[in-house]
Image (cartoon, rainbow, N blue to C red):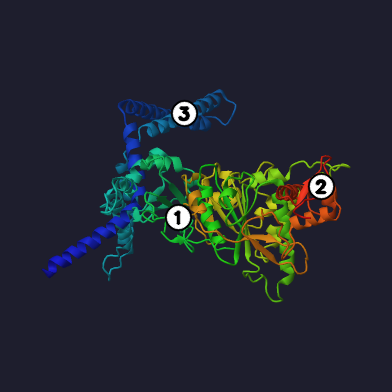
């Protein structure tokens, strides 16, 4: 029994070794077989007849040339006069014979190429040319007192053996071991990634000189490492993606990644036949839940709060559903507050019970002005030796979510109405983007991070991200994008080379996250969070900055803007308090109120409407504002 086990083990080890050597010899055997086949196809009866005719013509021309040369030598000996008729005639005949011989030799070379010797015969000739001198050298080097010196002959024999062994190993069919857990598709792809199949069919697809290793099954699919010869680099191999997919017979929808290998002459093919996130429930949200799951490794993906972040994705990619979990986390804790800026209004309406929302031009300008003021105040309070302010319930982290960025940029470019005697005109709407740029550059230390979301991640005139803001962002996430240029805008100029191909992601709810130099371009299944889930979340305090005393103003937390009959006057003074006070002090027109309070015209108009509806202010027939009955 012992010897049988030993024999089985030895046999298995031998087969494993041969299976490992076969791919190395496969290119040599493939080139040998291609050349042998080429020579066989050329050895036709027609080419043989042409060769025989060329040989006869060559032999005849060579004889004629020899005869003409002898005649010229005889004429030269017969006369010392180089201009004699005999010498001139012999010289002309010799020249013509030599030209004829040269032409016949050229024709014969072409005929030999068209009817070559078999590759086996050529190999025998070459080995004989080495073996015979090697054997003779062994005999001559042998001394009388020693045995035969055989090393020159052994070298010849070794070369012959290597040639034969290389052909045998290259033509050997390795035993393909397929994992029992493979699906039918994976088995078919693995069999085509086997070196024996690949080498046999690679030349027809323009992939000769590449040899893959047997595919390995991972939680994310099949992985094979490809050895490249001198004509290839990982970049040129990646450019052959269509030919590789055709050779493998892979589905068009199947995600295939071709990346650089461990060495310069290696590349890696990954076929995403599996998803490591399958079976993991990513619906809904609970505090502390991961943003998503890595489809390659199955690891949970966390996005820390307080990071400046870009979220890009084309329409229908699931951008809103994927970002809601981040916003829920950013508005959950007592020391966190959320602001949602949404010119399209749809997303902002879902968050009104736990975030301050800004939809109109006036609202966006007002909240960004307040944020810049808050930022400067916080920066002045950072103690020496620290680079970020400590957050608390009184001074919480304020996460600002912008959805959609392109609309905000377009909004800030709105032409302002110029002031007149009767109308103070519009504020400078361009200040909106100035505020965002300031927050992007300086607000990290003040714990006021931006999350900028857009469907158009380009930085041209109609794009959805400002270059100054983009340059400050550290976390970059993208769901499915439209083009590779958009992927480069989101992830950087090296996105294509490093594998950040967001334009190839499926829709919806699959993203990539680049959070640093060590991040991997792995697809991520993101958490799905519906509008109904957001509305069902419990209420949270809303952030609003007080404006009465800049030196002592802290944070004023309210659940909703005050809509009661009596304006709120306790605590920090609000814009409504200031507008009402201006009316009591004698301001009678919109311009008077704007000048006295320093508040922009849109905000003043909105507060006047609220005070009028509450009865605290009344408007006369000629458009003047007077204190209302309830304010008297």
Taking depth in this image into account, of 629 and 57 the one nearest to the observer is 629
Q: Can residue 418 be seen in this view?
A: yes
Whether label 3 touches label 2, CB < 8 Å:
no
Toward the viewer: 439 or 265? 439
Sooner in the amino-acid sequence: mark 3 or mark 2: 3
Is label 2 in a helix, a strand or a loop? strand
Which label sits on residue 284?
1
Of callouts 2 and 1, which one flags the residue occurring earlier in the amino acid sequence? 1
Q: Is there a contact, CB below 8 Å, between mark 1 and mark 3? A: no
Q: Residue 78, how many percent across, how many down?
A: 51, 30
Which disc is residue 625 wearing?
Answer: 2
Q: Is residue 340 left or right of residue 46?
A: right
Q: Which residue lies furthest to the left in this view?
A: 1
| Relative horizontal placement of residue 276, taking residue 520 as reference (left or right) | left
Look at the image and tell me in which quarter the C terminus lies.
Answer: bottom right
Instruction: Depth check: give the residue in front, 420 or 385.
Output: 420
Give whichever of discs 1 and 3 has the lower sequence position: 3
Q: Badge 3 is on which residue?
A: 103
Q: How crowded is mark 2: few (under 14 residues within 10 Å), some or many (20 or more)?
A: many
Residue at (82% x, 42% y) in the render = 623
Percent x, y of residue 418 = 83, 42
List the single residue furthest toward the right.
421
Q: Residue 600 carries which label?
A: none
* Residue 419 in picture, x, y percent from top left: 85, 43
- Please say if 541 is above or below 366: below
């Amino acid at each position: 029994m012992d010897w049988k086990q030993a024999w089985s083990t030895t046999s298995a080890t031998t087969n494993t070794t041969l299976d490992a050597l076969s791919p190395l010899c496969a290119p040599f055997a493939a080139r040998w077989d291609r050349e042998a086949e080429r020579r066989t196809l050329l050895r036709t009866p027609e080419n043989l007849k042409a060769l025989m005719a060329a040989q006869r013509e060559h032999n005849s021309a060579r004889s004629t040339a020899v005869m003409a040369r002898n005649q010229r030598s005889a004429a030269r000996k017969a006369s010392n006069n180089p201009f004699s008729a005999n010498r001139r005639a012999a010289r002309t005949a010799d020249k013509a014979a030599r030209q004829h011989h040269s032409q016949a030799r050229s024709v014969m070379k072409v005929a030999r190429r068209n009817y070559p010797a078999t590759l086996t015969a050529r190999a025998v000739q070459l080995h004989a040319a080495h073996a015979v001198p090697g054997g003779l050298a062994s005999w001559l080097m042998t001394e009388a007192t020693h045995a035969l010196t055989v090393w020159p002959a052994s070298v010849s024999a070794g070369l012959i053996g290597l040639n034969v062994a290389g052909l045998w190993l290259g033509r050997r069919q390795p035993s393909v071991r397929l994992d029992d857990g493979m699906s039918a598709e994976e088995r078919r792809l693995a069999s085509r990634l086997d070196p024996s199949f690949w080498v046999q069919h690679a030349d027809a697809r323009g992939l000769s000189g590449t040899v893959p290793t047997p595919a390995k099954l991972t939680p994310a699919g099949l992985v094979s490492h490809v050895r490249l010869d001198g004509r290839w680099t990982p970049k040129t191999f990646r450019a052959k993606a269509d030919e590789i997919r055709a050779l493998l017979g892979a589905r068009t929808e199947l995600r295939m990644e071709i990346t650089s290998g461990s060495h310069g002459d290696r590349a890696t093919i990954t076929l995403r036949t599996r998803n490591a996130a399958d079976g993991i429930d990513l619906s809904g949200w609970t505090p502390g839940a991961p943003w998503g799951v890595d489809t390659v490794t199955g690891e949970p993906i966390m996005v820390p709060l307080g990071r400046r972040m870009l979220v890009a994705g084309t329409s229908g990619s699931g951008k809103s559903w994927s970002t809601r979990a981040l916003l829920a986390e950013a508005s959950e804790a007592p020391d966190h507050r959320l602001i949602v800026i949404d010119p399209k209004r749809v997303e902002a309406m879902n968050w009104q019970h736990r975030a301050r929302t800004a939809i109109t031009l006036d609202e966006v300008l007002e909240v960004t002005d307040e944020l810049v003021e808050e930022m400067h105040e916080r920066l002045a309070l950072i103690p020496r030796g620290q680079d970020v302010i400590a957050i608390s319930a009184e001074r919480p982290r304020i996460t600002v979510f912008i959805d959609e960025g392109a609309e905000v940029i377009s909004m800030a470019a709105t032409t302002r109405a110029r002031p007149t005697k009767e109308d103070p005109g519009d504020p400078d709407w361009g200040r909106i983007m100035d505020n965002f740029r300031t927050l992007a550059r300086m607000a990290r230390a003040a714990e006021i991070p931006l999350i900028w979301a857009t469907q158009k991640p380009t930085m041209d005139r109609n794009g959805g991200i400002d270059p100054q803001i983009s340059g400050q962002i550290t976390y970059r996430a993208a769901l499915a994008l439209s083009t590779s240029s958009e992927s480069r805008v989101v992830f950087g100029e090296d996105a294509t080379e490093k594998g950040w191909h967001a334009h190839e992601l499926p829709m919806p709810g699959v993203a990539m996250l680049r959070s640093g130099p060590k991040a991997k371009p792995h697809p991520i299944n993101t958490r799905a969070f519906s509008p109904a889930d957001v509305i069902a979340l419990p209420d949270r305090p809303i952030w609003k900055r007080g404006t009465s005393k800049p030196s002592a103003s802290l944070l004023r937390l309210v659940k909703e803007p005050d809509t009661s009959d009596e304006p709120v006057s306790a605590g920090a003074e609000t814009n409504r308090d200031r507008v009402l006070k201006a009316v009591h002090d004698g301001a009678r027109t919109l311009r008077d109120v704007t000048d006295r309070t320093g508040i922009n015209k849109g905000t003043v108009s909105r507060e006047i409407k609220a005070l009028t509806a509450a009865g605290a202010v009344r408007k006369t027939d000629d458009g003047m504002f007077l204190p209302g009955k309830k304010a008297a």
